[in-house]
Amino acid sequence: ITEGARNTVRFAMGSRHPELGWEMARQTIMSSFARQRTENFLPAEITYYATDFNQDQERTQDLLVLNGRVVEGFAALMDEQLRTRGFLGVDADTIRRIARQVLDYHHGYALYDLEPYQGLLSVSTLKMAARVGTDLSLALAGVPLHQRRNTRLSRLQGRPGDLRGLVARMDESEQDTFFGALEAALAQYVRRGGITDGTGNVWTYHPLPRTFYTFQERADFPSRVRGKVEETFTLEELQQPPHNTLLQTVPGLAEKLTVFFVLVHRYYKDTGFLPDLRPRNAGRDIFLLGIWGQISDNLLITVRRTDDGEVHADLCFVDNKDQFKEYRRNEDRKSPVGVAKHALRLTGSLVEPALLRSIGLFTELAYDNERGAERSRASLVEMYSTKGLDIVHEVLHSGIEQIFDNGKVMVEDVVDDIFTGLKKWFRPRR
């Protein structure tokens, strides 16, 4: 499906390109930014990484008691190893906190060193297939697979905690000695299978189940502070009665939407990432009509009334963490995204024109509101009679451009992979 075909479908359904000239549009955008310079479209958020409250609370308390016993025993092992190596100035509380951090890391999610991407047909792929086949065979045979533990304690230097602050005050020689003591204590712990108490029982550390908790400010909270909230609705509902008249009757709404979509487009051009502004009916609106952002459930509009009786509208972009990465050959051709990278090329031909249309639509509305006059539109018959050849020209031109562009990038990927493999093949063996 080409961009030209989507233009034709949208035109048949009543959509029109903005008639505002570029210079006037630029002035309208700049004045919109000047008037809406204090606006913030993102709600405040606080994120915690804490114990999962969905777990059984009684079991969680038992784990806390058990882990406290294991931490005390492991702290004693650490203190013994540190004293053997001459580290006498570390207080007991600090050793205890570092012991908990080491055990959390050791029993946490396994960390792996990833090999650089070498293409689909490479030694790395064969090694991965061999590992998958071996583990699958062991699992089918009923052989228990032991969980991989983290033992490279030097990685803890980059994590928040007491250990990073303590190590930062040491020179290189002291750091080597300090980590040698920690690794020796951890080796004892691994050899024994845990911490042994006075009765000979062995206790092992069990990490508490944790998860992320994100608390986001209500979309209408800032509006409640500034006036009386009348209603909150989505950008998609703004296109339908009775909300569709608000773009003309509520001051500043079209300007805020103009500023918002210009910022989204600039973010996309600077980073290659697209915020999640996809419409609810993605199959029809994205792939058939090429719409992205103009109708979305993730942009909420709150209408409020001030004490003076004035009506205003505020924007709030919720669920703003979900984003889509555009495939950029110079950045991503060596990334292990496989076939998915070809699908990501749709962002260029689909989403960017959609963002530009949203900017054009709301910029034109902001310009009309500033003039205080409604822009006249030519009839459908007149548009077809005067611009028919231009429409056909655009359909053919856009279709040919998309066909050659998609074919070009696919050939480029094949050539890149072939020459990457050849370079590795002819590389001198040592």
Image: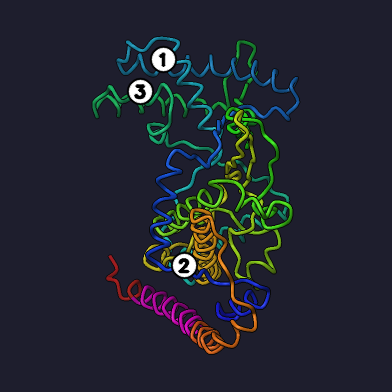
Quarter of the figure with residue 271:
bottom left
Question: Which of the two labelled residues, at mark 3 and mark 1, occupies the earlier sequence position?
Answer: 1
Quarter of the figure with residue 219:
top right
**323 relative to 169 in the view: left or right:** right
Tell me the tag on residue 80. Answer: 1
Do tag 3 and tag 1 residues touch (Cβ < 8 Å)? no
Q: Position of residue 279 (x, y in %)?
A: 65, 59
Question: Which of the two labelled residues, at mark 2 and mark 1, occupies the earlier sequence position?
Answer: 2
Toward the viewer: 226 or 95? 226
Q: Position of residue 267 (x, y in %)?
A: 44, 53
Residue 383 sits above or below residue 81 on the image:
below
Q: Position of residue 402 (x, y in %)?
A: 50, 80
Mark 3 or mark 1, whichever is nearer to me = 3
Quarter of the figure with residue 57:
top right
Q: How is the image coloured?
A: rainbow
Cα–Cα gap, marks 3 and 1: 21 Å
> Which residue is labeled 3 in the image?
165
Quarter in which the N terminus is drawn: bottom right
Looking at the picture, which amino acid does disc 2 mark? Leu
**282 relative to 419 in the view: left or right:** right
SS majority, magenta: helix
Question: Which of the two labelled residues, at mark 2 and mark 3, occupies the earlier sequence position?
Answer: 2
Residue drawn at x 59%, y 15% is 69
**212 relative to 155 in the view: left or right:** right
Label 1: few (<14), some (14–19) or many (≥20) C-alpha neighbours in 10 Å: some
Q: Secondary structure at mark 1?
A: helix
Quarter in which the C terminus is drawn: bottom left
Q: Which residues are magenta?
A: 400-422
Q: Secondary structure at mark 3?
A: helix
